[in-house]
Amino acid sequence: MMVVVEDKAAVESSHNRSVIARWTGWSLLGLVASLLVAHGGAMAIAGDRATGILDVPTIAQYYSHGGLGVLYWQHGLGAVLFGAFVAGFWLLNKDRVTKPVDAMLLGAGVVAAAAVVPLGLTVLGLQAALAKLAGAGQPDALLAVFVSWDWIYNSLFYWLEVMWVGAFSLVMLRTALFPRWIGVWGLVVAATHVFHSTVLLTGMPDAVTLPGTALFLVWLITIGVKLVRWQQ
């Protein structure tokens, strides 16, 4: 009888993990979809994004395009979905970490990833404010808001991503929740984000971040698909 009870509990636990994994995966894929809508839509409407500049007329011209505010608003949902992904990743791994180092990595990754949600919403709020100010013909108020957004999002924000991507990737490697190549891929992504954090500081063109950004997006999609198709 004890064996039957234990087997039933094991089956139920496996089912629960599968449900968590699938919802975690869909949350991550939803985030990527929202991200692509926001950035792809902005590029279609206003062209290449404004960054690393102090020219007020250029900033005003970019943010005066109608529809940008709606794109930033919808991406708030992406931030919420990312929070769901972080919670799901923690739930899937918390019982797998058996060593103090692994627990520290998981905790550090969760803290950094959780911080992305409020900071991401702040960044979106700053961009929505830029669109509002440009649309209202208030160019004098644009520069301070723009520079704040630019340095938060296009430089310092990357350090949070280095931390959570790197920590989650190491957890993947140590717990075998994912194939090892996904964990290694994540470490490469984390390294590219260290480089990305220096682009604004050194004055390099924004285009140099495109390969690393593409690598990051495909990595996220791969993780999302793996979770949605969870078999364990």
Image: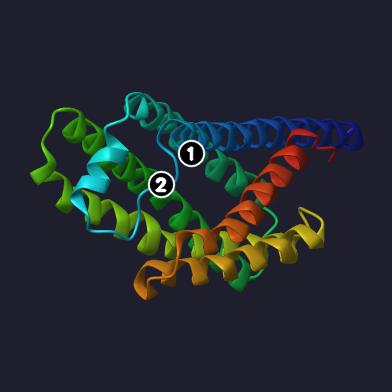
Q: In which quarter of the image is the C terminus?
A: top right
Residue 112 horizontal/vertical position (percent):
45, 58
Residue 184 horizontal/vertical position (percent):
73, 66
Q: Residues within 10 Å of mark 2 (few under 14, many from 20)?
A: few
Residue 16 horizontal/vertical position (percent):
71, 32
**Residues at marks 1 and 2 touching, judged by CB atoms closer than 8 Å:** yes
Q: In this view, does 16 lie to the left or right of 147?
A: right
Residue 76 horizontal/vertical position (percent):
40, 32
Q: Is residue 53 left or right of residue 142?
A: right
Nearest the viewer among 44 and 150 is: 44
Instruction: Report which residue position mark 2 lands on.
Output: 49
Q: Quadrant of the N terminus?
A: top right
Which of discs 1 and 2 lies nearer the camera? The answer is: 2
Nearest the viewer among 161 and 69 is: 69
Q: Quick check: can you spot residue 94?
A: no
Note whether 202 is above or below 207 in the view shown.
below
User: In percent of the image, x 13 and y 32: which residue is there?
Assistant: 137
Q: Is residue 194 left or right of residue 12?
A: left
Give the Cα separation between the discs numbered 1 and 2.
9 Å
> Which is more N-terminal, label 2 or label 1?
1
Colour pattern: rainbow
User: In percent of the image, x 48 and y 40: which residue is there?
Assistant: 83
Instruction: Report which residue position mark 1 lands on.
Output: 39
Q: In this view, does 222 lie to the left or right of 8?
A: left
Nearest the viewer among 108 and 82 is: 82
Q: Quick check: can you spot residue 123?
A: yes
Nearest the viewer among 110 and 27 is: 27
Note whether 93 is above or below 166 in the view shown.
above
For badge 1, the amino acid type reads His
For badge 2, the amino acid type reads Arg
At mark 2, the secondary structure is loop
At mark 1, the secondary structure is helix
